[in-house]
Image (cartoon, helix red, strand yellow):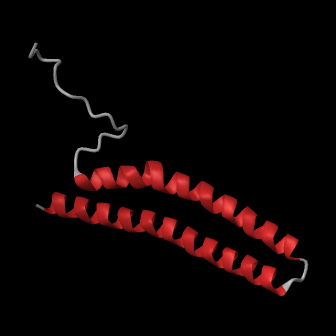
Amino acid sequence: MGGAGSGLENPLRGNANTIPDLLMLIIEQFVVPIGGVIVVFMFIYSGFLFVTAQGNSEKLQKAKDSFIYTIIGAALVLGAFAISSIIQNTVEQIKTAL
């Protein structure tokens, strides 16, 4: 049973063999695409709220809040990607320096 081909294969596409590689892979393949789709739908929803407010101050405030929260969410998604890229590059530079 224990031949040369009995090892476990890495199920992740991208060969994440270290923790920083795994985190970058998760952020690149799951967080950013799913977060991006959610952000697009929330921008559409916010626009829908603005259109249906029809001058009602309460509905307009809800639409403004939704728009602001969507911008904050988009910044968080892009920020997570940027921070993970910076951390990965820093770790790679440290590894090559040693």
Residue at 27% over, 56% down = 20
Q: Nearer the viewer, residue 59 or 91?
A: 59
Please identify the residue farthest to the front as the structure is shown: 58
Q: Nearer the viewer, residue 61 or 43?
A: 61
Say if 61 sits above or below 88 in the image.
below
Please identify the residue farthest to the right as the structure is shown: 54
Please identify the residue farthest to the bottom as the structure is shown: 57
Say if 66 sits above or below 78 in the image.
below
Q: Quadrant of residue 7?
A: top left
Residue at 10% over, 15% down = 3
Q: Where does residue 10 sit, x and y in percent of width and height? A: 27, 34
Q: Quadrant of residue 58?
A: bottom right
In the image, 76: left or right of 49? left
Q: Where does residue 76 sit, x and y in percent of width and height? A: 50, 70
Viewport quadrant of the N terminus: top left
Residue at 41% over, 55% down = 27
